[in-house]
Image: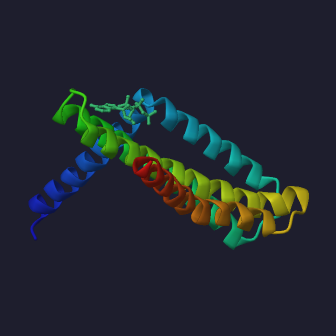
């Protein structure tokens, strides 16, 4: 590798970084929900400075905050791509957009569970049962609601 190609590789890398940053900034400007997630993440991370948290707990909080923001970015992409594909009303587009929004909701529930367990202990001295119950409620509850909904529909069709 000569000095010239090394320099051009570096320029490309810097350009890619600038483009990626522009993408983040644009998404932040355009998406209200993304701004909300950044705000909540900022508040949680600031609060974490005033609490007695282990390294592991801080890492979980950071993981939760970054995950929700990452999923919101992905959801923004899906919405834009679907709108580019077609602006007509289409049940398949509705499905894709709703699942994508559901993905953000799912990760938000994960973040709330992490918050309940870690911040709940550090601020209110809660046992981790509350966070665990919250997680179980959604992991078990969601499929259950869907199964019960399906059974009800089937029963209605038979009548
Ligand atoms: N082309 C379409 N066909 C059918 N349903 C659609 C279509 N576009 C949007 N929807 C429905 O409207 C909802 C909102 O879609 P929209 O693209 O407006 O996202 P948004 O309001 O920006 O969502 P978010 O609050 O997640 O950013 C979708 O989840 C979907 O249920």
- 109 or 23: nearer the viewer: 109
Q: Could you tell me residue 8's position as x and y percent?
A: 14, 54
Q: Could you tell me residue 77's position as x and y percent?
A: 31, 42
Q: Quadrant of ligand 1?
A: top left
Residue placed at 75% from the left, 71% from the top? 54
Q: In which quarter of the image is the N terminus?
A: bottom left
Above or below 97: residue 7:
below
- 125 or 10: nearer the viewer: 125
- 111 or 149: nearer the viewer: 149
Camera sees residue 73 = no
Most distant residue in the right direction: 125
**Lateral position of residue 125 relative to residue 8, left or right:** right
**Lateral position of residue 120 relative to residue 37, left or right:** right
Most distant residue in the front direction: 159
- 135 or 44: nearer the viewer: 135
State the count of labels: 0
Residue placed at 56% from the left, 41% from the top? 37
Q: Could you tell me residue 123's position as x and y percent?
A: 87, 56
Camera sees residue 23 = yes
Its colouring scheme is rainbow
Residue placed at 39% from the left, 40% from the top? 24
Q: Could you tell me residue 48's position as x and y percent?
A: 75, 55
Residue placed at 57% from the left, 51% from the top? 108
């Amino acid at each position: 590798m000569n000095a010239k190609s090394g320099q051009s590789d570096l320029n490309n890398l810097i350009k890619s970084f600038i483009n990626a940053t522009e993408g983040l900034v644009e998404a932040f400007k355009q998406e209200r929900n993304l701004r909300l997630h950044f705000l909540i993440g900022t508040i949680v991370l600031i609060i974490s400075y005033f609490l007695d948290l282990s390294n592991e707990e801080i890492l979980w909080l950071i993981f939760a905050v970054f995950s929700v923001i990452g999923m919101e970015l992905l959801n923004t992409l899906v919405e834009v791509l679907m709108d580019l594909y077609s602006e007509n009303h289409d049940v398949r587009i509705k499905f894709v957009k709703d699942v994508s929004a559901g993905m953000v909701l799912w990760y938000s529930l994960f973040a709330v569970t992490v918050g309940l367990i870690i911040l709940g202990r550090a601020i209110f001295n809660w046992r981790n049962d509350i966070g665990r119950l919250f997680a179980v409620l959604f992991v078990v509850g969601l499929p259950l609601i869907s199964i019960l909904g399906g059974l009800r529909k089937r029963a209605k069709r038979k009548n």
